[in-house]
Amino acid sequence: MTIFRRTLIAVTATALFGASVAAVAQDIKPRLIRFGYGLNEQSNQGRAAKVFAEQVEKASAGKMKVRAIGAAALGPDTQMQQALIGGAQEMMVGSTATLVGITKEMALWDTPFLISSAKEADTLLDGPIGEKIKSKLQDKGLVGLVYWENGFRNLTNSKRPITKMEDLDGVKLRVMQNNVYLSSFQTLGANAVPMAFSELFSALETKTVDGQENPFNTILSSKFYEVQKYVTVTNHVYSPWIVLVSKKWWDQLSKTEQQILTDAAKTSRDFERKDTREEAAKAVGDLKAKGMLINELSATESARMRAKLTKVYALIGADIGMDLWNEAQAELVKIRAKK
């Protein structure tokens, strides 16, 4: 065998070996999943996103890797939703309220005073009503995995305590970009201003708006106590988050990969709800310690607000379909009967 031929064989073998190593490396490269969320890493949302990422990596033996990206770095909820629909982003968690423009049935969860306890929320969201609404997302290019808890929403503002409905008159109140929230607070007398959450702190700081409404956890983790003085405990809406997947991307996954994500989402949901409720229970004390003045809306005033919102309830029923509205009300009656 000539030196040339031996050299050619050696070079060819080396090239083939290099190609096979590259192929193997390609095969074992983990599937990267960008998981976007709006709050900061230290929030309940951030902690649960970390649990989700750990569960996925563990269950897939490192073949799937979640990169959790918080603080709205990938954009507000609405922008991330469109990125998922287009296949430019894999996953996110965000408010159901910002999905109403995509799937009108999501407006059920925005109904003021619909849900009165965490038990009611869990049973309704994880039961047939919650599943039915989640399933509507698939036609829009999204897959809903589980509902997380944002929590019962309460009012904050920099002008005055809200002790009665009339105290909302003239208050510039930031609300989510959602017609139910807009109509509800306009009906109650506030000057409702739709705005992305990512713009909210700055708007409060510059007095572009006077107040906002969010669960205690978000008020605390977002440091709204630095730019707000008054908190009114209203519990006016139970606010869920939902873990979403791009359907374009989901359809490329194997059944095993889909199951890994589904199981991890359920584990993160159970962690997140427990974590959120524990944090909310102590958040009132923390907010007081930060200098916020807290008052609780009376049952009488809550009832006055409900009565004032009758037309809004009718509009929600018409928008989501009266069949779904009536099913939800019937389900709540059953849940309450089991107490």
Image (cartoon, helix red, strand yellow):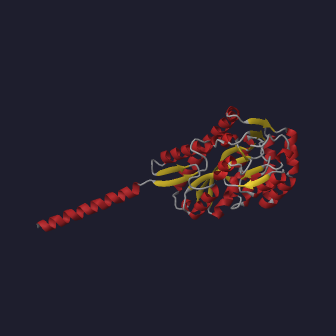
The residue lying toward the viewer, choosing from 11 and 199, is 199
Residue reaching furthest left? 2
Q: Quadrant of residue 324?
A: bottom right
- Image quarter where the C terminus lies is top right
Residue 109 in picture, x, y percent from top left: 74, 51
Residue 52 in picture, x, y percent from top left: 55, 46
- Image quarter where the N terminus lies is bottom left
Q: What number of labels is visible?
A: 0
The residue lying toward the viewer, choosing from 181 and 5, is 181
Q: Quadrant of residue 22?
A: bottom left
Residue 294 in picture, x, y percent from top left: 76, 36
Q: Residue placed at 37% from the left, 56% from the top?
A: 25
Q: Residue placed at 55% from the left, 57% from the top?
A: 90
Residue reaching furthest front? 206
Q: Is there any visible trace of residue 99 in the rendered image?
A: yes
Q: Is there any visible trace of residue 322 in the rendered image?
A: no
The residue lying toward the viewer, choosing from 331 and 273, is 273
The residue lying toward the viewer, choosing from 223 and 249, is 223
Q: Residue placed at 48% from the left, 50% from the top?
A: 65
Residue 241 in picture, x, y percent from top left: 66, 49
